[in-house]
Image: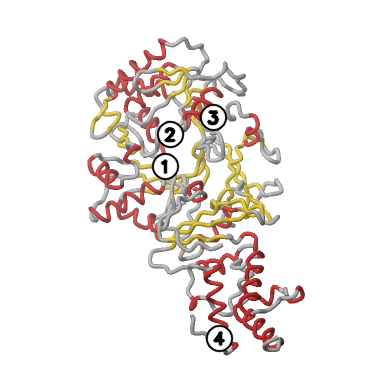
Amino acid sequence: MAEATGFRDAFLAQVRERPDAAALVWHGRETTYRELYEMAGKAGAQLVALDLGPEEPVGIVAKKSPEAVALVLACVLAGRRFLLPSPAFADGTLTELFAQSGCRYALTPYGDAMLVAWDGPPELRVAEWTDVTFMLTTSGSTGLPKVVPLHQAAVDRFIAWAAEKFDIRPGRGVLNYAPLNFDLCLLDIWTTLAHGGRVVLVDPDHAANGYHLLELLVRHEVHVVQAVPMFYGLLLYAAMTRDPDRRFASVEHVMFTGDAIPQCTLEQLPGLFPAARMYNIYGCTETNDSFVHELGPQATRAGGPLPIGAPLPGVHAEVVGTDGTVLSGPGTGELYVSTPFQASGYLNRPSQNHRFAPHPQGWDDRRYFRTGDLVRRTVDGEIFLLGRSDFQVKVRGVAINTAQVERVLLDHPDVREAAVVTQPDDLTGVRLVASVQRAEGSRLNSLVLRSHCAKHLPAAGIPAELRIGDEPLPKTATGKVDRNAVKFPDVSPDVQGRVS
Amino acid sequence: MSNVSSNVSSNVSVIKQFLIDEFLPDVSAAELDVDHDMLSDGVIDSLGVLKLIAWVEERFGLTVSDTELDPDNFRTVTSIDAFIANNTRSVPAGS
């Protein structure tokens, strides 16, 4: 892949060439490229006022807003590396993350730099620290979030790919749904600003309000939409109840990512976006996007899971069996990927860096990332995501993959959503608890679902407790099933059919 | 449910009610087939078998010996019913 123009130069070129074009739209107000550049200049003054060492990163605590975008831009333009964690993390987590990455200062979009309270700089152990600007974090669903330093060259390569693939250029509108700290913003926000388009920002405070999303799209023409499946579900529900004839004919590219898209959502998308090509995108913070599957004309009606598709240009992938050997044909195993966009390791987390590994059989010199995702490759070479390969638990001494149990539950025609979690059990050590949303109008009960599980799972894999209800399962802010909330539910009369 | 006759086979409804109360609160008596295998799909786990035996002993005045602790006696409503019927017949009334 040819070296891409750097983000910094590309953005400055847009400011020069089209200063009065809209760069951002926020609650109906436009920010032009000139205004955004001036805002970034003001934010940059904060940086100059601090006694920062040449290599020293800063923390950014910012909810999405034009000011927050300007603050990130200020860092990029100044070549100042920065850590951008979720502002929703607990204070203690933020402090720990800043300490771990050597940030003495945390900046906010409104001009106040906070001194982070921690005990001296840690010993920085990152292989290739130069050329890092963006530092994002993992979600922290399994402990302290991990810091992912992205090389600017990798970011630039991604931006070049995304702009070409989704035709992002002056005059184009791109919807940004994800929070500012998400890797998805590399496409929605940063690719668009590098290529002269207009970003329509969704305020995270209104992200769960389908009517707000509907109105935003009605008021602001966009051509590219990327979001988690939940976004489309909310939007479709809002359109169905308030504006059933609504069509967004300007949208040409619709991408969903982050989770499996429910069939009922998928089927309705062509009606709402009649002119759009649709893509199922697979990626993670560590590698950025690595697979894309463009749906064929009838694919939204076909039913069944969607494949993750083909590797992006320059991406190498292997399916690795439980015995560590690379599968050459069909089979199930963990997905390893190597992308031109990936990080070279976590920052200061040597115990986690085994996930960045050489080719398992030494077939090439690339560095691969062990995604932890369990995939199935068919005889046709299509890859389907099955779940997490590390969701292994032992129940009565038997190794059980909770993702597989979820898959079996979801295979039942009356099951709409399912989550399986473990709970400590005095008798067996660990017990499986399943929460299930049954399909509308279904009278599915635990007996029927148990019989179904017994046919497809070893006895230890049959959940000890099946909670069957009519309500959707709790979701995280990113639209994924929130297993923590499933694990520790509020005592709620909605939860029916508790069975022990 | 209270109108259980003394006919041995009528224990089915009493057994079903116990199983539903104890293990299957979201299931109706009609939905629980008398031949449904409750051990293979985990309706009754190992602790559940013990609860079931304790109930059978208490409700029907039986003593279940170790040799009768064969899980197959407790696999379905039918097998539980048969177990109760066999054991109440083998015990002379009033003893």
Q: Residue at 54% of width from left, 19% of height from top?
A: A118
Colour convention of the picture: secondary structure
Separation of disc 4 and disc 2 at Cα? 60 Å
Tell me if mark 2 has few (under 14), some (14-19) or many (20+) residues whose alpha carbon lies within 10 angstroms of its own: few
Mark 2 secondary-structure assignment: loop
Spot occupied by residue A93 in the image (x, y as percentages of width and height):
51, 30
Residue receiving disc 4: B10
Q: Earlier in the sequence, mark 2 or mark 1?
A: 2
Q: Foreground mark, 2 or 1?
A: 2
The picture quadrant where one finds residue A301 is: bottom left
The chain letter for the residue carrying disc 2 is A
Residue receiving disc 2: A88
| Residue A477 marker | 1
Spot occupied by residue A192 in the image (x, y as percentages of width and height):
36, 32
Instruction: Check disc 1 and give the amino acid type.
Output: Ala
Badge 2 vs badge 1, beta-carbon distance below 8 Å: yes
The picture quadrant where one finds residue A431 is: bottom right
Q: Foreground mark, 4 or 2?
A: 4
Q: Earlier in the sequence, mark 2 or mark 3?
A: 2
| Residue A147 marker | 3
- In this view, the residue in front, A378 or A68, is A68
Looking at the image, residue A157 sits to the left or right of residue A195; the answer is right
